[in-house]
Image: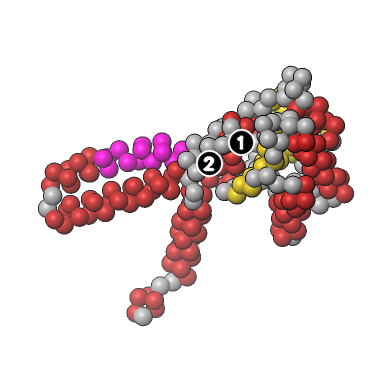
Amino acid sequence: MKLINLMEWQDIFDILIVTIIIYRGLLIIKGTRAAQMLIGLCVLFIALLFSKHLGLYTIDWIIQSLWAQIVLALIILFQPEIRKTLAQVGETRFLPSFASAEGLRSLEEIVKASVSLASKKIGALIIIEKETNLKDFIEMGTQLDARVSRELLLSIFHPSSPIHDGAIIVRGNRVIAAGCFLPLTLSAHVSRAFGTRHRAGIGLTEETDAVVIIISEETGSITVAVGNRVEKSVDIGSLRDFLTENFISSKEKKK
């Protein structure tokens, strides 16, 4: 009680900020390889404490030697998570407006194109940008800046198209780029049934907040992903609901 009385508002504010940072950090690494690595580091730290307490000098010396390189190891091991965090913190652009009639039309065009591609078993990877800017991935593809339409998406992903490989990136109501290559996920939790296209789409969601639609050319099934959420074999209604939830509903909540 005496300690509480000695605390000032700055101390409470300081603790609150640290708590939020730790909480957000845990959310970012949840379900990733970094979470397992963090557990390993905690075990190493506990072993260090026990070695000091029990007088195990050799073990203590070995662990102390490892700690000398810990900063470099953390940067290497957590590089994807650090990049994702910095991208989110540095991003100031607001969620694209999909609440307008034009925005709703664009989402519906994406739904129709996805279902049409799936019915023909044409593989596709559609990325819809949210708050994290995908500039680095856009620059690696063919820049288009064309209005979103079912016909455009079908023509891009047609096997005879020179830019059908890779992903298209949609920003607002425009297809910004096509033929973009994405980072493959290395997560052990991803189904082995998923091929390169699925792993690329999921890999992007591990680094950004983008919404990903993946269409399998083998089965014609549609998979959607955002953050740590992956839904397989969605139908037209589920796809429409998924996009509405991530764009229309999310925008309304921000108002």
Using the numbered discs, state the Cα–Cα distance from disc 2 to disc 1 in whole angstroms: 9 Å
> Disc 1 marks which residue?
198
Q: Residue furthest bottom?
A: 1
Locate residue 73: give its quadrant. Answer: top left
Q: Residue at x 79, y 43 (%)?
A: 111
- SS assignment for the magenta stretch, majority: helix
Judged left or right of residue 230, residue 246 is right
CB of mark 2 within 8 Å of CB of mark 1? yes
x then y, percent, for residue 58: 13, 43
x then y, percent, for residue 219: 68, 35
Is residue 44 visible to us here?
A: yes
Vertical comparison of 217 with 224: above or below = above
> In front: 39, or 45?
39
Vertical comparison of 161 with 201: above or below = above
Point out the stretch of residues depicted in magenta: 66-81
The amino acid sitting under disc 2 is Val
> Disc 2 marks which residue?
190
Judged left or right of residue 63, residue 150 is right
> In front: 146, or 19?
146
x then y, percent, for residue 155: 81, 27
Q: Secondary structure at mark 2?
A: loop
